[in-house]
Amino acid sequence: MPAPASARRRADWLRAEITRHDHRYYALDDPEIPDAEYDRLVGELRELEQRHPELVRPDSPTQRVGGVPVAGFAEVRHQVPMLSLDNAFTREEVEAFDRRVRERLEARHEIDYACEPKLDGVAIGITWRDGVLEQAATRGDGTTGEDVTHNVRTIRSVPLRLGGRGWPALLEARGEVFLPLAGFAAMNRRAAEQGEKTFVNPRNAAAGSLRQLDPRLAASRPLDVFFYGVGRIEGAQLGDRHSGILEALRSWGLRTAPEARVVRGVDGLLAYYEDLGQRRSGLPYQIDGVVYKVDSLDLQRRLGFVARAPRWAIAHKFPAEEELTTVRAIEWQVGRTGALTPVARLEPVFVGGATVSNATLHNIDELLRKDVRVGDTVILRRAGDVIPEVVRVIPERRPRGTAPVSLPATCPVCGSEVTREEGEAIARCSGALICPAQRKETLRHFASRRALDIEGLGTKLIDQLVDGGLVRSPADLYALRAEDLAALERMGEKSAANLVEALDHSRATTLPRFLYALGIRDVGEATAAALASYFGSLQAIREATPEQIMEVPDVGPVVAGHVHAFFAEPRNEAVIAALLRHGLHWPALPKPAPGATPLAGQTFVLTGRLDSLTRDEAGDRIRALGGKVAGSVSKNTHYVVAGADAGSKLDKANRLGVPILDEAGLLQLLGGA
Ligand code: IVH
């Protein structure tokens, strides 16, 4: 029975409506209706098509997953070859590129360039005939690729039918298929839970997903595409600029990189590179560089190609974030609280813009899970400012005769027993007060910039003082005389006198700094400030019960327990008493009144240079009023305080719509405090 006209009209309407919502949801990240409403539309269309199979059309949103696996990948010959790009790694190479372009064009003016992120994914060419998706092919060798239409159809941001107006009768758009980082992480988490193989990086995961014969697999992975150009085109012209092509693609519902910009001249290129390099680690997808393209299509034609790459474009690569290196040794570091941390000593390697020779392995569980051994070749990752990390071992390159690492039974520094509480990942040296490593770490922390800020008391000197038996606790520092110090190796009279002066200077401090300097477990700067402003005096904190300590904002039972236990320990009390005897002091805090923490619950991010106070001081004052100071901007940030030369944090605040304060605004908020 042929479908009645009303059913046909309804199906057409549903298809158009679902396509429109797909575009809003997947391409614009701006859904208009709740998911349930969307599901209802799809359900209704599916039912109509089941009842009247003649209504099914290949561009129907119900037809994304074809259901049947393909037998193999058919070859696709690219009518317009898919080229690659030359690479530039340095500023000079970019300058040379711009010079070549201008010389060849005999240009007297600066060139306009279209700049885009270089996505780390899989190149794809997707063809729409009369607006309907017909074929998707991988790059292959540039001339012949593989037909992956069945998988690309499952990518929700790829329209099965073009939207907008004026598209050519035949359009092949070129772009990069990729897995956003969040989707990649979720996919690997799921795989790990089910005991399946995890993927090394998003690019491999994207490539692996496209090479599935069964489209249901690709459909279950959150793939996405950014388009960056066109291949074959018939039946229309596309304007005269690359940036115009991107605009046209966008108007037909294809996704392009939001970071794309047109800049002028080589300075514009380098500024773009700088800017994106800074934002790189905050982007939701992996990029390995930026691509510069001469924007004018006419100039592109005049420049032409060499071998397999255009003369009018170049990829400017970022330093690789992952490199191979080998493990020379695995050592155990003993921290301030006795925690044993395994550290891999590595063959130095340049990665993520820095030379790295150490990487933490976090704890014994992590070490055993990754099974890192001395002699192993490992993938080392350093992304942005994140500390370097051993991603995994390359088992194929493991030399013969290696042994798994195990937790030492005794502390490598003092020989005390190593203990590990039930269910805890962290093992600790039980030598507390006799362990020189713990003593040294305690002193380092005590002297550090955000604690008592004792200038000139560095790591080497602390080692000498502890190893020589001159100092056992922070209080001993204040008993040091210039002549004791001058007798030490590599220590002149001048530096000895300077250190005594610095120590003297450090006697005048603040209660939050003093509390932080004590190195109580889990008491960072924020907690120290909160304790100080809640209790008002050291005496009050010493006398507080765990229950009272838990009244402090953001302090839970674990931290309260640590604070209480610290002051209950007679040896700690003895050190504190000695410090006070040596004249450490701080201004009394006003008795806390209700409302003394007007900034409680508010998170600030400080960026740029302030005039009337340093960022540290501003942070101290924010914390004193109960506020928090965070290092990076997120949607949970309440204010970004922007001083002179504020950079990417300010950009991010603008993007997320976080309120921005200038110095005057901050001072006003801090009031008379
Ligand atoms: S343009 C003729 N633009 O990088 C120009 N390529 O070596 C050809 N890629 O496999 C490519 N992001 O898949 C271009 N914004 C971008 C890109 C990009 C990533 C990939 C592309 C190709 C490789 C070039």
Image (spheres, grey):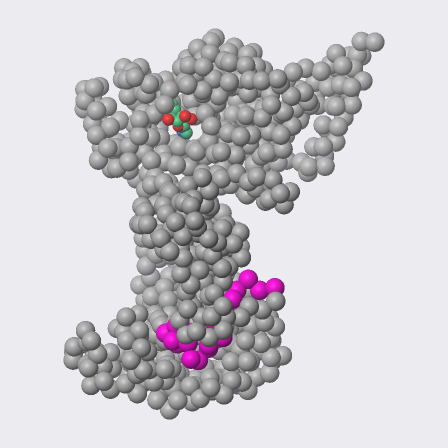
When the figure is inspected, residue 354 is found, relative to residue 540, above or below; the finding is: above
In this view, which residue lies farthest toward the bottom?
581
**Who's the residue at 36% across and 34% down the image?**
290
Res 113 seen here: no
Residue stretch rendered in magenta on the structure: 423-440
Q: Is residue 410 left or right of residue 484?
A: right
Examine the image and state in which quarter residue 93 appears.
top left
Res 143 seen here: yes
The percent position of residue 300, horizontal first and vertical second, equals 31, 18
Q: Quadrant of the C terminus?
A: bottom left
Give 263 or 462, whichever is nearer the viewer: 462
Give 33 or 449, whichever is nearer the viewer: 449
Q: Is residue 81 left or right of residue 267?
A: right
The percent position of residue 117, horizontal first and vertical second, equals 40, 34
Residue 250 magenta-drawn? no
Examine the image and state in which quarter residue 501 appears.
bottom left
In this view, which residue lies farthest toward the left?
493
The percent position of residue 604, horizontal first and vertical second, equals 46, 60
Q: Is residue 285 left or right of residue 113?
A: right
Q: Quadrant of the N terminus?
A: top right
**Who's the residue at 27% across and 74% down the image?**
461
In this view, which residue lies farthest toward the front?
401
Give ligand 1's quarter of the image: top left
